[in-house]
């Protein structure tokens, strides 16, 4: 007659198996995807004036 031996796994192995099962459970959950607007193109923020445009010159004559 054969004897039955109780074999215990190391605590590290048990923790590793539990961790992998938790990670697997996280991956199986459905994810919600939100429709986000496209980011604005890189450059100056809107509303900031362009300094390269036509600029006026004012001459004030105090001699008269």
Image: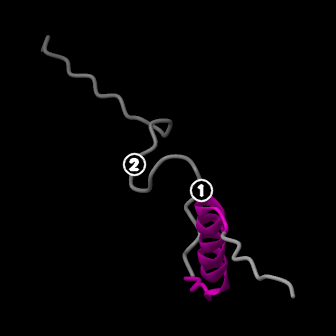
Asked if the magenta segment contains residue 25, the reply would be: yes
Residue 22 screen position, x and y as percent: 59, 76
Q: Which residue is mark 2?
A: 48
**Residue 63: % across, % down:** 14, 11
* SS at circle 2: loop
Q: 28 above or below 54?
A: below
In the displayed structure image, the side of residue 37 where residue 6 appears, left or right? right
- Tell me which corner region of the image, top left, top right, bottom left or bottom right, holds residue 25: bottom right
Q: Does 18 appear in magenta?
A: yes
* Residue at the outermost top position: 63
Q: Residue at x 60, y 79 (%)?
A: 26
Q: CA distance from mark 1 to mark 2?
A: 14 Å
Looking at the rendered image, the quarter that the C terminus falls into is top left
- Nearer the observer, 37 or 3: 3
Q: How is the image coloured?
A: one colour
Q: Position of residue 33 (x, y in %)?
A: 59, 83
* Disc 2: CA contacts within 10 A as few (<14), some (14-19) or many (>=20): few
Residue 17's place in the image compared with 33, above or below, is above
The residue furthest front is 1
The magenta segment: 9-34
């Amino acid at each position: 007659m054969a004897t039955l031996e109780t074999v215990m796994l190391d605590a590290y192995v048990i923790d590793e198996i539990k961790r992998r099962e938790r990670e697997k459970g996280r991956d199986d959950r459905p994810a919600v995807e939100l429709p986000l607007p496209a980011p604005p193109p890189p450059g100056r923020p809107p509303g900031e004036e362009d300094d390269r445009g036509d600029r006026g010159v004012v001459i004030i004559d105090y001699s008269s």
